[in-house]
Amino acid sequence: MPFRLFITLATLCLCGTAGARTVDAASYGYPLTNPFIATIATTPAPLQPAGLPEDKHIDQDDYELNLRPERGFTLPDNFWAVKRLKYRIARQHQAAPLVFLIAGTGSNYANGTMEFLKKVFYKDGYHVVQLSSPTSYDFMAGASRFATPGFSQEDARDLYNVMKAVREQQPDLPVTDFYLAGYSLGGLDAAFVSRLDETEQDFNFRRVLMLNPPVNLFTSISNLDKLVQTAVDGVTDTQTFYDRIFTKLATYFSSRGHIQIDAAMLYDFQQSPQGLSDEELAMLIGTVFRFAAADIVFTSDLINKRGQIVEPDAVIGEGTSLTPYLRSSLLCNFDCYINRQLLPFWRKRTGGTDLSQLIREVSLYGLEDYLRASPKIAVMTNADDLILGRGDLGFLRRTLGDRLTVYPHGGHCGNLNYRVNVADMLEFFRG
């Protein structure tokens, strides 16, 4: 079964050490050893850090940046909400260090993981700026110069321009030092932004933290695409996968007498007779990323008028149904996007020709010398992370040494809100 292959490959990479910190499974205490359950349910509430501030106790506001004014004329009217890029900032009431947070694949600045990390760093005394992923449709529309995410160097330049614009828009914010963190694809983005800053030196980041980043971007994409192809027992022509999931959820909620969806509910659901199988969990995770890919495929094609999803002369108004475009976009996975949109763009931009060269350039392998030489950069990841492949952990061990922390389990970002992980994040930032 494909999902078992991912776990095996990630585990095989544990051989060979170079000073990395490998957390002992027996002492770690994170209860979800199934990577699929961990990825979906994250950390049970009692094991999350205590005392995080509520929103009403945080001095925060959302702002807009008009970085691509031409999009106000070229994008359809129903894109009005994203023609300007929004970001969120939480302020301390005195001079303090500032941390920029970069969201993961397809996510905007205000999703649940970003809100959690905001509270963690805000409580510890940081100003916090939350930024959408370059792969989110709001960033593509409101900030990206080329709206073709995945070319990491250009994504980093777009993020860097956003960060500088935030500073210009917040001239009265007293900042002592700058920090940078990102999770999932946002972690990889953070590394490329950090290298760019070595030349530009607008921020001189003191610490840069990558949380569960992809190492080889193409491997991670392939792993996620394969999850959608997992064979699920009991799914027939008359009972689709989603029908099956909804039926299980309906039965579970009926037995409880109420509907409540949160991490605790998901954990309890998995202990019930209706709990999902590993195959169903794998496909559910893969489906989430497939929708993220569809957003990228559609938005990139629309903005650049490539004609692969939306006819270049199509008139899209507020009443236009986007369902046909969504259906076409869902048929084009991450691999399809790379070959049909990203690779041709990269070839035209750089003169490169070989797909393997593109893959290396946009992955952490392309930053090997910089990562090895920069003591301010660290990675925290999991041995069973679904997006890692053969050799990825070995590469991180050789390259980062004791700046790599490997937790025994947690899936993909499932343990980010575990109190042990949070304590490690804060300890690294404190230096």
Image: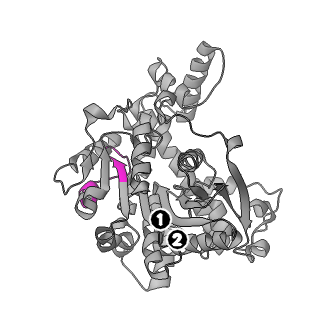
Q: Are marks 2 and 1 in contact (CB under 8 Å)?
A: yes
Q: Please tell me how crowded label 1 is: few (under 14), some (14-19), or many (20+) other residues with Cα within 10 Å.
A: many
Of residue 414 and residue 404, the one placed in the foreground of this image is 404
Of residue 348 and residue 50, the one placed in the foreground of this image is 50
Image quadrant holding the N terminus, namely: top left
Disc number at residue 102?
A: none
Of residue 45 and residue 37, the one placed in the foreground of this image is 45
Residue 246 placement, left or right of 25: right
Which comes sooner in the sequence, label 2 or label 1? Answer: 2
Label 2 is placed on what type of residue?
Asp
In the picture, residue 253 is in which quadrant? top right
Q: The residue tagged with tag 1: helix, strand or loop?
A: helix
Residue for point 42% across, 55% down: 430
Asked whether residue 229 appears in the rendered view, the answer is: no
Residue for point 38% across, 62% down: 218
Q: Which residue is mark 2?
A: 155
Residue for point 35% across, 60% down: 215
Label 1 is placed on what type of residue?
Asp
Asked whether residue 192 appears in the rendered view, the answer is: yes
Q: The residue tagged with tag 2: helix, strand or loop?
A: helix
Q: Which residue is mark 1?
A: 189
Q: Position of residue 272 (x, y in %)?
A: 48, 18
In the picture, residue 98 is in which quadrant? bottom right
Q: Please tell me how crowded label 2 is: few (under 14), some (14-19), or many (20+) other residues with Cα within 10 Å.
A: many
Residue at the bottom extreme? 351
Residue 280 lies, with reference to residue 363, above or below; the image says above
Q: Which residues are magenta?
A: 380-396
